[in-house]
Image: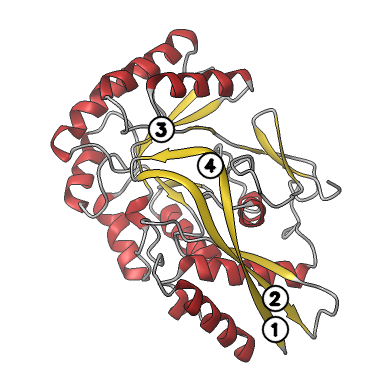
Amino acid sequence: MDYSYYISPYRLIFKKPAGTSRGVYHKRDVWYIYLTSDKYPGRVGIGECAPLPNLSCDDVPEYEDLLHAYCEKFCETGQIDYKELMQFPSILFGIETALTHLETGSLAFYNTPFAHSEAGIPINGLIWMGDYQSMYQQIESKLAEGFHCIKLKIGAIDFAEELELIRLIRERYTEKDIEIRLDANGAFPTDSALHRLNELAKYDIHSIEQPIAAGQWSQMAALVKNSPIPIALDEELIGITHLPDKKHLLDEIHPHYIILKPSLHGGISGSDEWIKLADERDIKWWITSALESNIGLNAIAQYCASLNNALPQGLGTGALYINNIESPLYMSHSSLWFDIRR
């Protein structure tokens, strides 16, 4: 089968600076793969490759050269080299989803109620790191929009102020009204992490992602055993690509949850592998986007809808950028919806 491709770089501009414990994003560089084939005349499959600066294991200076090399290899062989692309998950995700788009001829990748506009995907409302006032305003906005699950990125301001923000939420809403998820992005000092978790537990927290920095398996395992709040792994999974290593990590730490970002954690195929391993160990999971544009976000949402996971997912809303790509995705009543007619 003859495939052809071309690559289009694109720079996304944030409407507002996006704060994380690793810094503040103002822009985001992505690459779109456009895939064609003689087998599907008139069709074009589009996939998004979007490594996150200073986080993705494939955030390397020669990224665009590698992207061309792997696209050329795919077009020559007609096969995705999953083994070699394990170390380049955002490239694998882009090629996988471009091929799925090409083969289906539609942005509705799977036969699901979501793809038929019959059901939305419940998501959490994301509260970005910032000063006390900006985070409080974001919380007020998300609650006014009707979100029943919010996720606060913490670790950038004084811990006492973060506790006060959470206390104010719980003063107004019980855990039955609002589910609170936290994401520390590894920001807690290892020696005081358990104390902080005990303080946070007073406010009925659903879970906390990556309380301490990745790579400290024994310390993280101890936290999982002793924490009053369920712990989820996120950054910990980055760069863990081989099956024995994935098993070892899950068996060593045995987290309550894992958070899967296909662009970071092995594309669609790698995410499938993580899910299978988690299910075998009674570890729960959900899917999260990683600041992709609407091209990547749609691919993740379609995949997510095919998995029938009842938990609120960590999908974006497509509203982060001033120059996002037009999309059939839209938000309604704290859920992400797909309407191919849009």
Disc 2 to disc 4: CB gap under 8 Å: no
- Residue 159 picture quarter: top left
Q: What type is the residue that disc 1 sits on?
A: Ser
Dot 4, how many residues are within 10 Å of its Cα: few (below 14), some (14-19), or many (20+)? Answer: many
- Identified at 64% across, 66% down, the residue is 47
Q: What type is the residue that disc 4 sits on?
A: Gly
Depicted 294 relative to depicted 180: above or below: below
Depicted 105 relative to depicted 171: above or below: below
Depicted 238 relative to depicted 305: above or below: below
| Image depth: mark 4 or mark 1 in front | 1
Q: 224 or 62, which lies in front?
A: 62
The answer for how far apart the CA atoms under marks 2 and 3 are is 37 Å
Query: Which residue is labeled 4 in the image?
Result: 314
Disc 2 to disc 1: CB gap under 8 Å: yes
Q: Which disc, if any, is residue 35?
A: 2
Q: Which disc, if any, is residue 84?
A: none
The answer for how far apart the CA atoms under marks 4 and 1 are is 33 Å
Counting from the top left corner in percent of width and height, residue 273 is at: 47, 64
- Identified at 50% across, 74% down, the residue is 64
The answer for how far apart the CA atoms under marks 4 and 3 are is 16 Å
Query: Which residue is labeled 3 in the image?
Result: 129
Which of the marked residues, 2 or 3, is nearer the chain's N terminus? 2
